[in-house]
Image (tube, grey):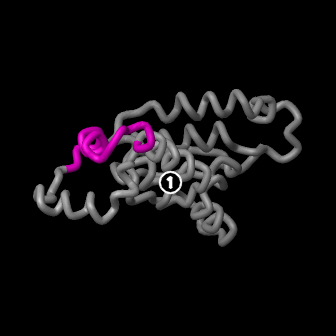
Amino acid sequence: MSKKITLKSSDGESFEVEEAVARQSQTLANLIEDNCTDGEIPITNVTSNILAKVVEYCKKHVVVDGGDDSSSSSTSEEDLKKWDADFMQVDQSTMFDLILAANYLNVASLLDLACQTVADMITACKGAEEIRAKFGIENDFTPEEEAEIAKATQWAFQ
């Protein structure tokens, strides 16, 4: 039986996870290696709803040594990619909170996935106005400044 690690979110909710799941986070892996995991580990920058999503992701992506009959080892790479795509179907606020949590906890694969999802959202946009609308970004350029930028970077608008 593997060791259990208890994580406590910023809003006080506790999550008990297996050590292998916690090790998906490089930050937590370092704490485990330094024997700093007695009791609860406070995750002060992450709320319970986001920590629950991070734990869900880590459970799905955990690599179990030996990999004999664990469900994660029988998950094909194609199934995992589909699961990842479904997992990232969240509102923008949750997406950005996941990016912050993945960065804080140093879960590289989740950070890469979330950032790639945002990059794909930007790539799907036809221009700056659509990107601004999609992400709620206010245009703070005057028409003169926009014309100057368009002239200086004409190659980008062809």
The amino acid marked with disc number 1 is Ala
Q: Which residues are magenta?
A: 122-137
Residue at position x 15%, y 59% from top? Answer: 141
* Count of numbered labels shown in the rendering: 1
Residue under numbered circle 1? 102
Q: Nearer the viewer, residue 97 or 120?
A: 120
Residue 49 occupies quadrant: top left
Residue 16 spot, x, y in % from top left: 56, 44
Q: Is residue 74 left or right of residue 30?
A: right
Q: Can residue 93 be seen here?
A: yes
Residue 40 spot, x, y in % from top left: 51, 57
Q: Nearer the viewer, residue 26 or 9?
A: 26
Residue at position x 29%, y 47% from top? Answer: 128
Residue 55 occupies quadrant: top right
Q: Can residue 14 be seen here?
A: no
Membership of 124 in magenta stretch: yes
Residue 35 spot, x, y in % from top left: 65, 69
Q: What secondary structure characterizes most of the magenta part?
A: helix
* In the rendered image, the vertical position of residue 87 relative to residue 40, given as above or below: above
Residue at position x 49%, y 59% from top? Answer: 103
Q: Nearer the viewer, residue 20 or 133?
A: 133
* In the rendered image, the vertical position of residue 44 relative to residue 1, given as above or below: below
